[in-house]
Amino acid sequence: MEAAERRGISLKRLGGWEPVTVTEYEYDGDGRLVRNWSQPESEWDQREQAWVAALAAYRAELCPCGCGQRYADVTSDEETGPQFVASRVVCRARLALLEAQKAAETQDVVGGARLWHVQMQKG
Ligand SMILES: [Zn+2]
């Protein structure tokens, strides 16, 4: 869902869906076309709207501190609510970036304009 959200498209369009346009024609008694009317399928049908609403509801339940836990859980009673255990891992890509930036630290004006990238090395 978040990949679709980042692109501003529906989940079904992310999966390859394309709208079908249905056109209806109206003719008079002599067979002349008097009106036509085209309607593309809605990208944001009830199912897609439900996905967006579900994502919003999920996010609304999260603690605003960024811990990734449900607010109701993290603010629950300490004695009766769930317990939490913290652990850590190191993002080695971020570590490589920070180390490279520290090694390149200079006082010149160019330092703030450097654009940094991290790539995974193969093999
Ligand atoms: Zn939190």
Image: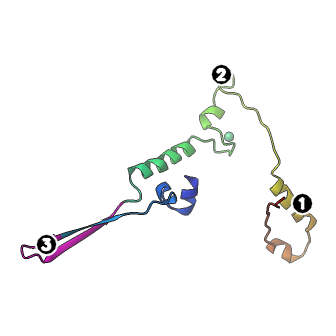
State which mark lies toward you, 2 or 1. Answer: 1
Q: Which residue lies at the image location 24% right of the left edge and 69% below the top edge?
A: 37
In whole angstroms, how far apart are the C-alphas of marks 3 and 2? 72 Å
The image quadrant that residue 68 belongs to is top right
Q: Which is the main secondary structure of the residues drawn in magenta?
A: strand
> Quick check: 56 left or right of 113?
left
The residue labelled by disc 2 is 80
Element carrying mark 1 = helix
The three-letter amino acid code for the residue at tag 2 is: Thr
Report the Cα–Cα distance between label 3 and label 1: 74 Å
Specify the quadrant of the image occupied by residue 25: bottom left
- Residue found at x 55% / y 62%: 7
- Looking at this view, name the residue that lies furthest to the front: 123
Q: Which residue is mark 3?
A: 27
Residue 87, image x and y in percent? 79, 38
Q: Which residues are magenta?
A: 26-41
Query: Which badge, 3 or 1, is on the more N-terminal residue?
Result: 3
Return the mark for residue 45: none
**Residue displayed at 13% across by 72% down:** 27
Residue at mark 1: 99
Residue 71, position as x, y percentages in the image: 61, 37
- Image height of 12 relative to 114, above or below: above
Categorize mark 3 by other alpha carbons within 10 Å: few (<14), some (14-19), many (20+): few
The verdict on residue 38 being magenta is yes
In the displayed structure, does residue 106 sit left or right of residue 6? Answer: right
Looking at the image, is mark 3 or mark 1 nearer the viewer?
Answer: 3
